[in-house]
Amino acid sequence: VDRITSQRAGEPDVPRAEPLPAKALVIEDLCGALPPQLGSVPGVVVRSQPKCLELDIALKLRIANGLHTAMVYAMSLGGLFETDGCIGHPDILPYLEQLFERDIVHV
């Protein structure tokens, strides 16, 4: 059970800004063995296409976790104690954007 960061439609290397529910159970069902209504249960996501679950995991681990970790280090050095302080920050936001463009999107 974890947050899922899915990709932006048409751009598989760019995460959506809005995650799925705060907690979600992701189930891979490539054979269609699960009841169809399971996917409509709040907090449950059923992946029925090959590689979708792998992409969810890759985006979560490489992009979301990587950027959040880098942000926390920058916040600590800058004396920020809440993530809201990063919004519009003259140094942290450009740093994260550069990190994403230079080190993450091309991996």
Image (cartoon, grey):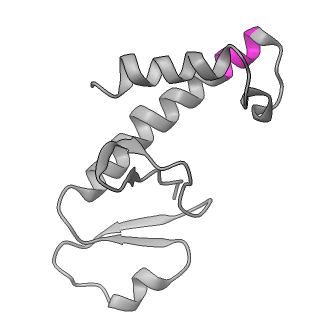
Residue 78 position (above or below residue 10): above
- Main SS of the magenta part reads helix
Instruction: Tell which of 45 and 78 is nearer to you.
Output: 78
Residue lying at 34% horizontally and 41% vertically, measured from the top left: 58
Q: Position of residue 10 (x, y in %)?
A: 29, 53
Residue 75 shown in magenta = yes
Using the rendered view, name the quadrant where residue 21 is placed: bottom right
- Does residue 13 lie above or below 56 as drawn? above
The answer to whether 43 appears left or right of 8 in the picture is right
Which residues are the magenta region?
Answer: 72-77
Q: Quadrant of residue 75?
A: top right
Relative to residue 97, is residue 22 depicted above or below?
below
Q: Which residue sits at x=36%, y=46%?
A: 57
Is 7 left, or right, of 87 in this rendering? left
| Count of number-bearing discs | 0
Report x, y in % for residue 67. 53, 28
Whether residue 82 sits left or right of residue 10 in the image: it is right
Residue 43 x/y as whole percent:
54, 72
- Left or right of 82 on screen, residue 90: left
Q: Is residue 9 magenta?
A: no
Q: Residue furthest top?
A: 77
User: In the picture, which quadrant includes the C terminus?
Assistant: top left
x and y, in percent, of residue 103 in the image: 37, 18
Q: Nearer the viewer, residue 23 or 20?
A: 20
In the rendered view, tell whether residue 28 sits above or below residue 9: below
Q: Residue 85 appears in which quarter of the rendering?
A: top right
